[in-house]
Image (cartoon, rainbow, N blue to C red):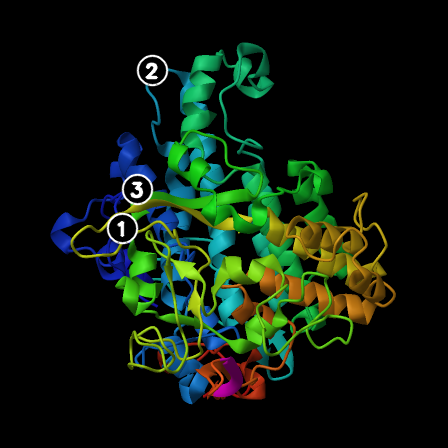
Amino acid sequence: MKLKNIIILGVATVALTSCDDLFEPAMENNLDISQMYSDPQFARGMIDNAFLVLPYDGSPSTDVATDDAVSNDADNNYKKMATGSWASDMNPVNQWDVRYHAIQYCNLFLENCDKVLWDYTSESLNEMHRDLYKGQAYALRGLHFFYLLRAHAGMAGGQLMGVPIHLSSEDFSSDFNQPRNTFKECIDQIMADFDEALKYLPQEYGDVDAASVPAKYKQMGADDAEYNRAFGSLQRGKIDGRMIAAFKAQVALLAASPAFESAGAATWEQAAQLAAASLKNVGGLAGMDPEGWHWFSNTAFIEAFKFTNPDPAEICWRGTVGESHSLEADNFPPSLYGKGRVNPTQNLVDAFPMANGYPISASASGYNSSDPYANRDPRLKAYILVNGETQGANGSAINTAIDATTLDGINRENGASTKTGYYLRKLMRSDVNLDPSSTTDKKHFGARIRYTEIFLDYAEAANEAQGPRANVGGANYSAYDVIKAIRHRAGVGGDSDPYLEECAASKEKMRELIRNERRLELCFENHRFWDLRRWKANLNDTARGMEISTNTAGALVFKPIDVEQRSYQDYMIYGPIPYSELMKYSNLVQNDGWR
């Protein structure tokens, strides 16, 4: 680790910079840590740095290392990972350095924040700002530890191990040669950080009247104007109690999953309880956003959005909201001036059921292989651009057939055309124009945590704990109820949803359905890579595509094809400890199977 290089910090910038610039500032720009005591902007910079490097990616990346997508970019590191190049010294999902850097910032802040003069005009404002940023620091430390653990925990010598826990800042004299803590110790510490953060943070940011100022601050003389400066709508986007409840649900789900359950860090019952607690913040099942499955295309809301506005019911924690066309430039078909980078697979297309709710393999589905996209789950065409559908500001029909007259056709040109016969639609604004003579930017609403994810967390945990129809963890709804609601809002299964009723008779069949619904709802949001591993699922399904041609009678012919072989070893359900760290520190032990 390079922690010893960041003991003395520079003032954080609020603009994104490279990691090198962020964590190894030039010495002439460094300021002594005591600068923060009289400079609250400098103190906030530490938390800003920990915020800026959170690992939320607004575009698909890890998806191309799964059976859901491939990349047409031969140099894509996730593609290399999936096809046999994943190693402890070539790890695209490595989180080691950047997470520990962020944790160091949090530790430094927590050790010094009580000495900071946050506001010299008011004792109560000084206290509220201290609480605000102290709460952020504890929550961020827990969150960075979570992502570090998810990427690097694993079996080592027969025991499920985590990562070294650092709860104090380190300097040049620190002993960096620390052993790994157990997985359970790490989970316990993450949850402890979240609980500590809750002591300081409000449940939700927003302006209040004088009667609603918390007693703690009212007793210090705070009025509503002061409270709103510290915890009002201007703070929306920062971590609050609602988000921490979702974090805890995510952590418990990971800990209860097959790959990690041996540590005894969380049970399915506990995971269901924490997910249910998070969902109370939207009113439980009744609060499910009916438009939540296509939040990214809710253009009227997105265009009118202001930073101080409340989020839609689907969004627990938003990412950035800004005007751009980068997602479209990367993923639009080449006829629309895009690079067509992320290509959904036939594997994923086949996972979408028919509109009647049956999987396409079921005899009752009505699936027609000669017209494979007809009468399907509406999410299919909302998330994936299939042959003949339109895209772009001008509504151009896209031909992905092998005999297409444009570069949109399958395998027409390396690095530009689709390799699977499909292009990405989800997350993007179809009204973006990439024509170099009239390029337009559009607002995009990034979602870090969707409540649909937490509903699916609950469904999975509740089903594993007590079966499909049990109300678990204080909820007044079951896994069955959640899946029925998710499918119904997307227009799947009709009022009776007979396939769901079949699945509800068995925990095993319901598990399969829940996992498939999770795959569909969260596709291209960087979940499946981690889900497959925590489930100890098959990682080596060949990525497939669809080759379309025209026969002599003028009819389209659909031929499934193999596109890309996956090459993962069994031990790769866990990621490696970085090779460079093992070379430096003898007390670190590698996960089994890795070198």
Among all residues in the image, which is located at the extreme front? 553
- Image spot of residue 558 (x, y percent): 53, 82
The span from disc 3 to disc 1 (Cα, nearest Å) is 13 Å
The residue tagged 1 is: 16
- Image spot of residue 418 (x, y percent): 38, 76
Q: Quadrant of the C terminus?
A: bottom left
Label 1 or label 2, whichever lies nearer to me, is 1
Residue in front for this viewpoint, 359 or 230? 359
Among all residues in the image, which is located at the extreme right? 505
Q: Quadrant of the N terminus?
A: bottom left
Residue in front for this viewpoint, 348 or 510? 348
Which residue range is magenta in the image?
Answer: 555-562
Counting residues from the start of the chain, the first of labels 3 and 1 encountered is 1
Q: Residue at x 34, y 63 (%)?
A: 332
Q: Is 113 displayed left or right of 256 in the figure?
A: left
Q: Are marks 3 and 2 in contact (CB under 8 Å)?
A: no
Is any atom of residue 88 visible in this view?
no
Q: Looking at numbered disc 1 in the image, what kind of residue is underneath it?
A: Leu
- Image spot of residue 423 (x, y percent): 42, 68
Q: Residue at x 77, y 55 (%)?
A: 479
**Is disc 1 placed on a helix, strand or loop?**
loop
Counting residues from the start of the chain, the first of labels 3 and 2 encountered is 3
Q: Looking at numbered disc 3 in the image, what kind of residue is underneath it?
A: Gly
Q: Is residue 556 magenta?
A: yes
The residue tagged 3 is: 45
The span from disc 1 to disc 2 (Cα, nearest Å) is 32 Å
The residue tagged 2 is: 121
